[in-house]
Amino acid sequence: MKKILITIFALILLLPNSLLAAEETAIDKGPSIRILNPLTAEVEKEFFPFEGSTTITGLSVATVNLNTDSYPEIIVGAGAGEKPLVKIFDYKGVFLSQFLAYSEDMTTGIRVSSIMLSSNKPAIITAPIEGGNSQIRVFDSSGKLLFDFFAFDENLLSGATISAGDVNGDGANEIIVGSGYRMAPIVKIYANTGHFLKQFSVIDSKFDSGINVLGSDINNDGKAEILISPQMNFPPEVSIYDFNGNLLNSFLAYNQNFNGGVNLSSADVDNDENIEIITGAGLSGGAHIRFYNYQGINKLDPKFFAYPDFRGGLSVSAADIDKDGQVEIIVAMLNYFNNKNYQAYKTIKIDLSKQKLYAYFRGLLENEFIISTGRWKYPTPEGSFKILSKFLKTDMARDYGPDNPDNYNLPNVPHVMYFYRDYAIHGAYWHWRFGTRVSHGCVNLKLKDAKWLYEWSDMGIPVIIYSSKK
Ligand SMILES: [Ca+2]
Ligand SMILES: [Ca+2]
Ligand SMILES: [Ca+2]
Ligand SMILES: [Ca+2]
């Protein structure tokens, strides 16, 4: 009898672990690339460029024909947490080659784009993402570095965004660079030799969390327009500029309350001889793709999702990669949450010794707050956790026994985010002793700080709790 009980007990213990293991196996493939038909939303192909990497947090994707077979290749850049690799795949998703775009120890992630330097000279452009600098590099089809330049101050770790197009109509493509995270929104234009040509501020835009750029002749006048959208933190507005920085048109790609950013691509997806603007929702959005014409009118299915459940945004490209006369949409998971590591794009760090909470975005300190954690009797747990649930308001009560002075009953605790069991980060209206250990294990913030952190935090982001002084 005892043995049976032990067996049952062992089974109960084992069950959740084995379920967890199954989940982890599914996740281990890493972020995916999908090839979709824009007319039917059908997935034609899926592959996993960094299968086996346990640290990669996302991808960037571009397309260009690099060799003599006239089929465009799929160019994939590694996101944060992985070596700065560019991997090249054919239109069937078969791996062809790879190269390091920057030194091996630069693991803050890269973006990729492509440019035709002349009619038969394709090239790959790379730029670091937020957390890295703004060194733009241009490689030939074999991965040989042709030239590089810093688009912004070398010490600035805001990253940069990249695209290309013949913006001045002289028959040669220019390199377009967009400013990165926490910079005033600026577009810089370089010749295809790396020679700086001009820049303009996006004066009617407040986007200071990085801008995405795209060069594409969307109005058929023989010159590429410059499209701009926010990387995050602003309404999903796509603005169209000419070479001189004149605003030609703008429209909202998604609901104006969506602040997760917009990624851009373009192609004639419906074969009407007009190029469509293709948008992919950014960092914290679902895998929502939309198609617009130059006027900002929605075309095709406005409810096109590349993945049913994924919420981490898409890097988007488009080309007729199988040469059947129909353009494909090629998407990459931009912000891939791997449950096994804690290098996600946003991280909350809590230093119990200093009674401080730090909010990091891609390794950059975005905000810090003075807090109150658990007193010595009810310590806040140290370790790696993540945001499990969010409540705008909730009641909190604890009964340690009759007449125990530690009992509490707090109605309407604001901006509550649970990270482990019944431990939460939340606003506290009942005391003003921030900077000292006051709570029963929760992490208390001032009301305005709690509101900011609540709005900034996404579900699942890591919460790392430690003591800098032991
Ligand atoms: Ca040009
Ligand atoms: Ca044009
Ligand atoms: Ca079209
Ligand atoms: Ca095709």
Image: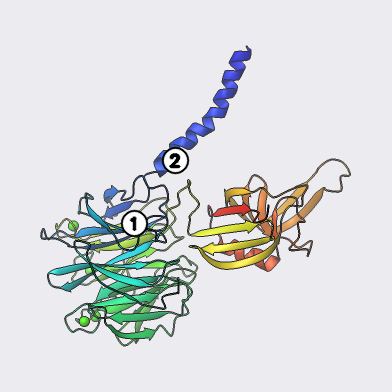
Ligand 2 quadrant?
Answer: bottom left
Query: 81 or 27: nearer the eye?
Result: 81
Q: In this rendering, is residue 400 above or below 191?
A: above
Query: 407 or 142: nearer the eye?
Result: 142
The residue identified by callout 2 is 24
The residue identified by callout 1 is 332
Residue 38 tag number: none
Q: In this rendering, is residue 299 above or below 189?
A: above
* Amino acid type assigned to the residue bearing label 1 in the image: Ala
Q: How many marks?
A: 2
Q: Residue at x 77, y 56 (%)?
A: 438
Q: Residue at x 23, y 64 (%)?
A: 269
How far apart are labels 2 and 1 at the CA level?
A: 20 Å
- Is disc 1 placed on a helix, strand or loop? strand
Q: Residue at x 34, y 81 (%)?
A: 188
- Is disc 2 placed on a helix, strand or loop? helix
**Residue 25, image x and y in percent?**
41, 39
Answer few, some or many: residues within 10 Å of disc 2's Cα (few below 14, many 20 plus, some between 14 and 19). some
Quarter of the image holding residue 164?
Answer: bottom left
Quarter of the image holding residue 162?
Answer: bottom left
* Amino acid type assigned to the residue bearing label 2 in the image: Glu
**Residue 238, image x and y in percent?**
38, 74
Earlier in the chain: of badge 2 and badge 1, it is 2
- The answer to whether residue 436 is left or right of residue 325 is right
**Residue 320, image x and y in percent?**
19, 60
Q: In this rendering, is residue 34 above or below 250?
A: above
Question: Please, which residue is most extreme toward the left here?
Answer: 68
Which quarter of the figure is the N terminus placed in? top right
> Disc 2 vs disc 1: which is toward the camera?
2
Are the residues tagged 2 and 1 within 8 Å (C-beta)?
A: no
